[in-house]
Image (tube, coloured by chain):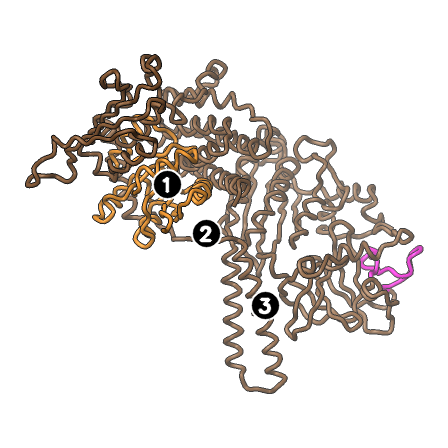
């Protein structure tokens, strides 16, 4: 059985690298994108099982990305987790209203990261 | 990729972010900022905070969070950016810089109390302008928000602690329509509970609609799950974290017959007004995506090692191509047209590969504005900075290495070049001094100039000092240019008192040596009363080198052009014995020690009979010397092959290269050659 593919989207290479290392250690394959535009370009070919995205990014931010992903029929049910530094009720509500499936609080713990992903992929 | 590698990437990103913040805030100060510029500053600070959190740099996280909060007010329009606010932000950026470097070097966190007080005031009350007077009162406000790391106040039901541990949990879960709309799936949640040891899962399908009117997104199903009594309640709630706003959920001890749990108010309610800005921002983001900013080009990141490998391969290709050209010529084959094409292609390919390593010098220039602000405070001089050509591209290694010499030259220009404000006014100049920083390409090299409009070099004083220090012979007749360049001599300093700024035990000789170590030169042109211009001439790349091809004893060598001052064929009488030295070259009043390549490299005696030429080299540490060679053949670009990587370091040699005829030539290191040629008995200084 092949590993689930996680697409990580963040303009910070540090965060991308940390996610990459943690996810690979836990049996995921990782595809990276440095902002929303790059993620949209790669989504079609990479077909990830879950998308993890930052909010603040140049060109196309996380909310814009989610909206454009959800606008495509075949990605309507794609689990999308938002990386956020705070999970305040306002931020959670905003992530939900924006179409996110769930959220991961930065800095993330490996166990919680894995649990959050396993919670949204079959 | 281990932790340290990622940490290195983090600090590299911090530097990039700080540079973005610097230029963004400078644009803001100049009134040229747009929304995207401000967003870029916000993102830079936000990214630093995010990375710092991952590595546990708590002081940095706290500070960046505060800074980011104020920037957020600014970009949301809650705070107007008048000049005073922008100045505060610039100082805040500088303190952020200090925080980053404290984290990087493991030092103590910088004293940020002043800036933190002012930022806290703005963060709490964006309407109020910053006032310095309030700064002492407000440090408590710098404490981070309690929920910064996502910890939320959760009301703990004390009764649940009193219940017997064995009493199982009863979880009632009814997903609402929204739960499935965004990619959540109740089945996965149930599976997670099952993995956690669920005792029993019961389905309640009484609310399921008839098939004819069934809405697949309206589940109409509910579950009751029994969890072992020793399961952590929070762990159960965590499972439903993503759907908690889209379901009816209760978690309680079974014995209590599943009284509905009081969810903390802030966890359960969904503030409706929050939707509005979200929608707006998404619309704005979509618009931004539809029209990407002009000048934005797609790019990919490539590991530097891979590019270097390509550079090496192309270098080999260039050599092979010229070897083939030679062979074709020897065989008298008529292939000149094809060979020309091949030659063009390989050269273009070489340029293209070099361009991949090229970076704008902007990153190196970005440190300057902050440095000048510090210098203004230290010296009481007012300075305006003019920057041009910051998009000029040069090899990444060169960009990385010019930072330090540049800082030194700027310090020198402000400290020694610019006069005190009163002296400037007396000299009929504006009170504010000007430092011009410029970069441009000039004949295959990059020239970076640091110009000031200060007092210029006092030649009489420099000359007197040089004679006094034994750097210049009392009877020498140096040109103005040569006098100016004496300030680069080791041990030379005209500062009458050692100032805090340039007097850090580091002279301009160190700048020159530093720059020479990567193939560059520093020169100076000065006009008394009008200022000085320091020029850094740097190679565009460190993979190829401009060199003079010379011959000695039948072998071919390459001397780096950066070290060469001139080439001469001596007239009779120019070589003579001075003191204990058998031969010294006399050149316009200066006496240069002669280094015979054959003697130093092969232990031969100086071959007087052969045709002789001299290459005058200037080394930053050991000064000038005349290298005696048999002939000077050619000047060309060569691809540097490391001796250390392929063999081992050899004294006197900087590397090797393959010439067009396929022969290997050694690249000389003049500095170490001169050191080898010196013996204690012949320690004749240039001043002799």
Q: CA distance from mark 1 to mark 3?
A: 41 Å
Q: Position of residue B479 (x, y in %)?
A: 74, 53
Question: Which comes sooner in the sequence, label 2 or label 3?
Answer: 2
Q: CA distance from mark 2 to mark 1?
A: 17 Å
Q: Position of residue B277 (x, y in %)?
A: 26, 31
Q: Based on the displayed image, in which of its 4 quarters is residue B159 positioned?
A: top left
Q: In the drawing, what numbered circle is on residue B301?
A: 2
Residue B590 as seen in the image, left or right of residue B417: right
Please, which chain is the residue tagged with disc 3 on? Answer: B
Dominant secondary structure of the magenta stretch?
strand
**Label 1 packing within 10 angstroms: few (<14), some (14-19), many (20+):** many
Which of these two is toward me, B621 or B664? B664
Q: In the drawing, what numbered circle is on residue A57?
A: 1
**Residue stretch rendered in magenta on the structure:** B574-595
* Contact? badges 2 and 3 (CB < 8 Å): no
The single residue placed furthest to the left in the displayed view is: B212
Please, which chain is the residue tagged with disc 1 on? Answer: A
Rendered colour, chain A:
orange
Residue B277 as seen in the image, left or right of residue B550: left
* Contact? badges 2 and 1 (CB < 8 Å): no
Identify the residue at image location x=81%, y=59%. Answer: B587
Identify the residue at image location x=36%, y=38%. Answer: A56
**Label 3 packing within 10 angstroms: few (<14), some (14-19), many (20+):** some
The single residue placed furthest to the right in the displayed view is: B580
Q: In the drawing, what numbered circle is on residue B316?
A: 3
């Amino acid at each position: 059985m092949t590993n689930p593919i996680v697409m990580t989207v963040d303009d910070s290479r540090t965060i991308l690298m940390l996610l990459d290392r943690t996810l690979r250690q836990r049996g995921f394959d990782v595809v990276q994108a440095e902002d929303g535009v790059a993620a949209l370009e790669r989504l079609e070919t990479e077909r990830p099982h879950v998308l993890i995205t930052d909010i603040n990014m140049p060109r196309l931010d996380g909310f814009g990305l989610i909206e454009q992903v959800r606008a495509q029929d075949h990605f309507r049910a794609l689990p999308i987790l938002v990386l956020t530094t705070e999970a305040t009720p306002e931020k959670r509500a905003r992530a939900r209203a924006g179409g996110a499936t769930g959220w991961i609080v930065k800095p993330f713990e490996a166990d919680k990261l894995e649990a959050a992903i396993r919670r949204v992929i079959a | 990729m281990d932790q340290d590698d990622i940490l290195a990437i983090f600090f590299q990103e911090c530097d990039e972010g700080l540079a973005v913040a610097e230029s963004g805030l400078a644009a803001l100060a100049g009134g040229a900022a747009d929304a995207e510029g401000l967003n870029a500053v916000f993102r830079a600070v936000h990214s630093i905070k995010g990375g710092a959190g991952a590595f546990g740099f708590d002081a940095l996280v706290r500070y960046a969070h505060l800074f980011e909060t104020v920037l957020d007010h600014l970009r949301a329009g809650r705070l107007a950016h008048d000049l005073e606010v922008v100045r505060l932000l610039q100082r805040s950026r500088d303190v952020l810089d200090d925080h980053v470097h404290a984290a990087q070097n493991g030092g103590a966190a910088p004293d940020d109390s002043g800036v933190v007080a002012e930022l806290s005031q703005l963060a709490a009350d964006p309407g109020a302008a910053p006032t310095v007077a309030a700064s002492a009162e407000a440090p408590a406000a710098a404490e981070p928000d309690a929920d910064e790391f996502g910890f939320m106040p959760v009301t703990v039901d004390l009764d649940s602690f009193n219940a017997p541990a064995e009493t199982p949990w009863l979880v009632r879960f009814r997903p609402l329509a929204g739960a499935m709309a965004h990619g959540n799936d109740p089945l996965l949640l149930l599976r997670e509970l099952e993995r956690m040891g669920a005792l029993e899962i019961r389905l309640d399908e009484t609310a399921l609609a008839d098939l004819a009117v069934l809405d697949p997104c309206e589940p109409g199903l509910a579950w009751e799950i029994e969890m072992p009594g020793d399961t952590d309640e929070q762990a159960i709630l965590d499972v439903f974290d993503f759907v908690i706003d889209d379901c009816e959920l209760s978690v309680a001890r079974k014995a209590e017959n599943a009284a509905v749990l009081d969810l903390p108010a802030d966890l359960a309610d969904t503030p409706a007004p929050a939707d509005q800005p979200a929608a707006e921002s998404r619309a704005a983001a979509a618009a931004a995506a539809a029209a990407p900013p002009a000048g934005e080009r797609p790019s990919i990141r490539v590991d530097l090692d891979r590019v270097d490998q390509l550079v090496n391969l192309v270098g080999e290709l260039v050599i092979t191509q010229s070897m083939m050209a030679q062979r074709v010529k020897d065989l008298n084959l008529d292939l000149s047209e094809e060979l020309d094409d091949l030659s063009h292609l390989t050269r273009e390919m070489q340029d293209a590969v070099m361009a991949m390593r090229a970076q704008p010098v902007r990153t190196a220039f970005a440190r300057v504005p902050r440095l000048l602000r510090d210098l203004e405070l230290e010296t009481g001089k007012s300075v305006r900075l003019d920057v041009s050509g910051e998009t000029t591209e040069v090899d990444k290694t060169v960009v990385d290495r010019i930072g330090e010499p540049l800082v030194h030259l700027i310090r020198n220009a402000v400290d020694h070049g610019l006069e005190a404000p009163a002296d400037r006014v007396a000299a009929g100049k504006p009170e504010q001094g000007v430092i011009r920083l410029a970069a441009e390409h000039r004949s295959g090299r990059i020239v970076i100039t640091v110009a000031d409009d200060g007092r210029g070099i006092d030649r009489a004083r420099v000359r007197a000092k040089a004679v006094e220090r034994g750097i210049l012979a009392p009877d020498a007749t140096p040109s103005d240019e040569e006098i100016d360049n004496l300030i680069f001599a080791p041990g030379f300093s005209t500062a009458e008192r050692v100032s805090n700024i340039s007097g850090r035990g580091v002279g301009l000789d160190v700048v020159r040596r530093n720059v020479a170590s990567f193939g560059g030169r520093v020169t100076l042109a000065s006009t008394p009363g009008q200022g000085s211009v320091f020029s850094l001439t740097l190679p565009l790349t460190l993979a190829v080198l401009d060199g003079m091809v010379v011959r000695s004893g039948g072998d071919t060598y390459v001397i780096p052009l950066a070290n060469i001052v001139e080439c001469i064929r001596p007239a009779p009488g120019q070589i003579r014995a001075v003191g204990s030295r058998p031969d010294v070259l006399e050149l316009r009043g200066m006496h240069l020690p002669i280094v015979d390549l054959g003697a130093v490299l092969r232990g031969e005696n100086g071959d007087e009979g052969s045709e002789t030429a001299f290459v005058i080299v200037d080394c930053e540490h050991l000064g000038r010397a005349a290298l005696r060679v048999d002939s000077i053949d050619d000047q060309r670009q060569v691809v540097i092959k490391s001796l250390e990587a392929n063999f081992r370091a050899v004294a006197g040699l900087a590397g090797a290269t393959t010439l067009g005829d396929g022969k290997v030539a050694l690249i000389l290191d003049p500095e170490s050659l001169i050191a080898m040629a010196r013996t204690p008995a012949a320690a004749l200084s240039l001043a002799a």
